[in-house]
Image: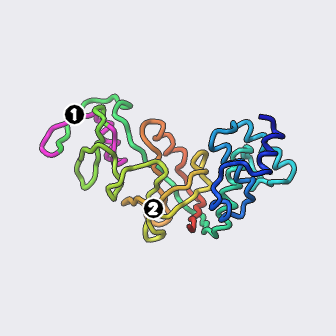
Amino acid sequence: MKLEIIIALILIGTFGISESFAKESKIPNWVLQVYGFWIEDKISDVELVNAVKFLNENNILPLALQKEYDYKSNFLLTVLYEDFAYKENSCDDGWYVTGYFIPVESDYSSHIFEIKIDDHLFEYDYDFVNSVKMEGWGRTNDGDYLGWYSNEFHLNKIPLDNFGNSLKVGTIAIDPSLYELGSKIFISTLLEPWDEVIFTANDVGESVKNKHIDVFTGEGSQAEEETYRITGYNNVACFIDE
């Protein structure tokens, strides 16, 4: 699709953003619509970047951040920040961010270790068991999830948070004395793609106190690597007022 056609479609408003969202936001409707077109896979990443370059270079949509971000990231952040400004969200710095994940037994290769669950003996990889005790849950070679809480092991079909809900990427643990559970939070200082995620605070943790956010990153070794990537101090967290 030629750039001129994309721009024309933007200006006449043929993209599929909901009317309610467009009315609630201060962002011009045609700006939101190009993002919606990209989300629906009606244009490619390259076409989106070319369109955003045109908008930026012609001062139609000055990008929110003049830092070393690519055009696509700048566009997404522009949309997010403008919408946050409209909703008068509270942004606060000085947050410590860590990550937690679900270890997968097949990623480990130490010696076999026996544990007792409900008076039955089970055999698992020793290093895997230790990782489960640190992270809370792990996926076994049998496909079940081994959990460690209340100082004992448990087996379940799905991994659970501290309230018995299924663990999902996009959820975080937070100190409920600072912000109530269910809060929507955007952490702009994280590395991509986490800097574009709107998290839901619906978990807690014994070590998650004061200005500490613990991000669930998923299952396996790649998720473990993500916990290292996002861990750091002095993060900016924006709490979205819905």
- Looking at the rendered structure, the secondary structure element under dot 2 is loop
- Coloration mode: rainbow
Task: Identify which residue, 50 or 102, lies in the foreground.
Answer: 50
Tell me where residue 96 appears, x and y as whole percent.
52, 58
Q: Is residue 142 left or right of residue 239?
A: left
Q: Residue at x 22, y 50 (%)?
A: 152
Q: Residue furthest right?
A: 58
Residue that label 2 marks: 174
Residue 149 position (above or below residue 71):
below
Residue 69 part of the magenta-drawn span:
no
Q: Is residue 83 left or right of residue 201?
A: right
Q: Residue at x 72, y 60 (%)?
A: 27
Local crowd size for mark 1, using a 10 Å CA cut-off: few (<14), some (14–19), many (≥20): few
Identify the mark at residue 193; answer none if there is no mark. none
Measure the C-alpha gap from mark 1 to mark 2. Answer: 34 Å
Residue 195 position (above or below residue 38):
below
Q: Residue at x 46, y 60 (%)?
A: 201
Q: Amino acid at mark 1?
A: Glu
Tell me where residue 147 appears, x and y as whole percent.
29, 46
Do the residues bearing badges 1 and 2 touch, measured as CB atoms within 8 Å? no
Q: Earlier in the sequence, mark 1 or mark 2?
A: 1
Tell me which segment is drawn in magenta.
Answer: 118-139
Tell me where residue 15 appears, x and y as whole percent.
70, 48
Question: Looking at the figure, which quarter contains the C terminus?
Answer: bottom right
Tell me where residue 107 appears, x and y as whole percent.
38, 31
Q: Residue at x 52, y 50 (%)?
A: 231
Residue that label 1 marks: 123
Question: Looking at the figure, which quarter contains the N terminus?
Answer: top right
Q: Amino acid at mark 2?
A: Ile
- Looking at the rendered structure, the secondary structure element under dot 1 is strand
Residue 136 part of the magenta-drawn span:
yes
Q: Is residue 92 left or right of residue 148?
A: right
